[in-house]
Image (spheres, rainbow, N blue to C red):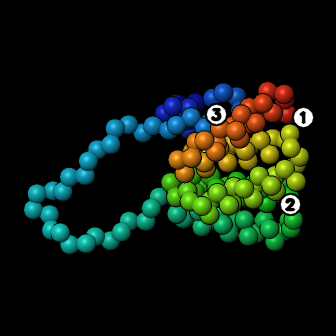
Amino acid sequence: MQDGGLGESNDNLCPHKFSFRCIAPRTSGPAIPFRRQAGAPDEPKKEAAKPGIDKIAQCREALRKAEAEHPGNTVEVAEALDDLVASQIDASVVDTETLAEVNREVQVAKAAAGPRSQTFLNSLGVEVEVWFALNRAAEARPIAERLLETAQKGVPG
């Protein structure tokens, strides 16, 4: 496992032995200012597709499929929502829609698998990540504390 930053690893597992993503801030090194090459024309360039946008579209389609094949509050729908929200976090396109999706994920996971299940705890971890991505750490803290408290009690087999 190679550490790609503070608490971040290649397999996105938290090094603290939790199976959800680590909520530690991610660092990617110093920012490098954009420099225009001398003599480069000021003509508009094609806007490059933002990395991860295709992944988000694939996850939305997978969610539609999971909802059709497993209607209601099911683990499959919770996992599809988790994949969708995680892809938005990875692509740095977290917004209020992402917050609504993660809230739905938490509710579905709790109803489908129970309040002490690994599925539910994973959804809480993702919810914390979304709050951090929205620069609203104050809202993330009570969720993270609840998550830690529940995880310390142990998750049923």
- Mark 2 to mark 3: distance in Å? 27 Å
**Of helix, strand and loop, which one carries label 2?**
loop
Disc 1 to disc 2, how far (Cα)? 20 Å
**Which amino acid type corresponds to the residue marked 3 in the rendered image?**
Cys
Q: Residues within 10 Å of mark 3 (few under 14, many from 20)?
A: some
Q: Residue at x 81, y 41 (%)?
A: 118
Dot 1: element: loop
Quadrant housing the C terminus: top right
Q: Nearer the viewer, mark 2 or mark 3?
A: 2
Give the residue at the far front of this rendering: 138
Query: What residue is shown with label 2?
Result: 73
Query: Which residue is at a point 64% across and 42% down the rendered structure image?
Result: 140
- Mark 2 neighbour class, 10 Å CA radius: few under 14, some 14 to 19, many 20 or more: some
Q: What residue type is disc 1 on? A: Pro
Kindly identify the amino acid type of the residue bearing the numbered disc 2: Asn
Q: CA distance from mark 3 to mark 1?
A: 20 Å
Q: Nearer the viewer, residue 101 or 119?
A: 101
Q: As drawn, is 13 to the left or to the right of 119? A: left
Query: Between disc 3 and disc 1, whose residue precedes?
Result: 3
Question: Mark 3: which secondary structure?
Answer: loop
**Which badge, 1 or 2, comes first in the chain's sequence?**
2
What label sits on residue 30 in the rendered view? none
Q: Which residue is tagged 1?
A: 156
Rendered view: 14 above or below 139: above
Between 140 and 17, the one nearer to me in the picture: 140
Residue at 38%, 37% in the rendered image = 29
**Residue indicated by mark 3:** 14
Residue 89 lies left or right of residue 34; in this view the side is: right
Residue 34 is situated, as x and y percent measured from the top left of the image, at 25, 52
Give whichever of discs 2 and 3 has the lower sequence position.
Answer: 3
* Crowding at mark 1 (Cα within 10 Å: few <14, some 14-19, many 20+): few
